[in-house]
Image (tube, rainbow, N blue to C red):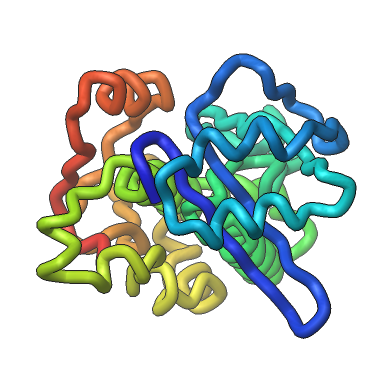
């Protein structure tokens, strides 16, 4: 980790992969097949431990895939107007890799949607779609926000704070993510949420960050705060 960049290295018995994330320099594209020389990566790790440079230099052919991380604003609505079609997973909500939750949220979507459809029956499938959407949207937006906060932690690390609590660098995902059962949550809250949609009865989700009151936000707001050097500090227990 260093100013404006971080690297993740993973290996098996026979293979190794590195993922270097750095501030946008304007050269990368939203293209997963574009190759570039590893020489373009080395300046971002200058002054880091020497083995990091050696890992990068070991890339076959001296090249690596170079693509731009694209992140979209959280969306409240994932369903079509008549709720006959709904997006789930990355189609509904994009994640930065530092969220470590993209696949988790996609799986949660599938369990939640299946439970809602089971409870609604075929004749009320559109209502089930709308219930699922409402049960999930705020929780997912919190996970997206968590990914940005983790990225900022990696790129602008306060080492004095880390020396006191090194676990802050190793724990990317909070208990509010790992301890959640999306299927049971749908079973427990389907009726109340459906009543809210149909009649306007009060309903509030409880599957987000404990102690955090969700407020809509945009990527532009978070990026602007980062450019000003302002840490993203939220209420609640994100650990």
Which residue is situated farthest in the top direction here? 26
Horizontally, residue 140 falls left or right of residue 105, namely left
Q: Name the residue: 44% across, 58% down.
A: 49
Give the camera-side residue of 82 and 8. 8
Horizontally, residue 61 falls left or right of residue 48, namely right
Which residue is situated farthest in the bottom direction here? 13
Horizontally, residue 78 falls left or right of residue 121, namely left
Q: Name the residue: 56% across, 31% down.
A: 71
Task: Give x and y (percent) for residue 4.
Answer: 40, 35
Q: Name the residue: 67% across, 51% down.
A: 56
Task: Give x and y (percent) for residue 216.
Answer: 34, 31
Give the camera-side residue of 149 and 201. 149
Horizontally, residue 59 falls left or right of residue 159, namely right
Note whether residue 141 is visible.
no
Residue 73 versus residue 53 in the image, above or below? above
Question: Residue 169 lies in what quarter of the image?
Answer: bottom left
Task: Give x and y (percent) for residue 227.
Answer: 30, 21
Q: Name the residue: 40% across, 79% down.
A: 179
Give the camera-side residue of 208 and 194. 208
Count the marks: 0
Residue 57 versus residue 70 in the image, above or below? below
Note whether residue 169 is visible.
yes
Question: Residue 189 lies in what quarter of the image?
Answer: bottom left
Quadrant where the C terminus sits is bottom left
Question: Residue 113 lies in what quarter of the image?
Answer: bottom right
Task: Give x and y (percent) for residue 68.
Answer: 66, 29
């Amino acid at each position: 980790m260093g100013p404006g960049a971080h690297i993740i290295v993973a290996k098996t018995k026979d293979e190794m992969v590195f993922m270097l994330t750095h501030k946008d320099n304007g050269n990368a594209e939203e293209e997963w097949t574009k190759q570039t020389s590893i020489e373009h990566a080395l300046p971002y790790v200058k002054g880091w431990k020497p083995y990091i440079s050696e890992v990068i230099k070991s890339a076959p052919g001296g090249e690596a895939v170079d693509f731009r991380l694209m992140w979209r604003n959280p969306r409240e609505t994932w369903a079509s107007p008549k709720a006959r079609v709904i997006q789930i997973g990355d189609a509904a909500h994009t994640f930065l890799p530092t969220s470590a939750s993209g696949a988790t949220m996609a799986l949660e979507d599938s369990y939640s949607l299946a439970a809602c459809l089971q409870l609604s029956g075929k004749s009320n499938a559109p209502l089930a779609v709308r219930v699922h959407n409402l049960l999930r949207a705020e929780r997912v937006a919190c996970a997206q926000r968590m990914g940005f906060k983790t990225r900022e932690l990696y790129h602008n690390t306060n080492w004095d704070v880390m020396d006191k609590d090194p676990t802050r660098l190793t724990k990317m995902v909070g208990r509010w993510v790992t301890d959640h059962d999306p299927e049971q949550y749908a079973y427990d809250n389907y009726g109340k949420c459906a009543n809210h949609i149909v009649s306007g009865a009060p309903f509030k989700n409880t599957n987000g960050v404990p102690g955090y009151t969700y407020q809509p936000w945009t990527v532009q707001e978070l990026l602007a705060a980062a450019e000003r050097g302002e840490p993203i500090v939220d209420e609640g227990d994100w650990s």
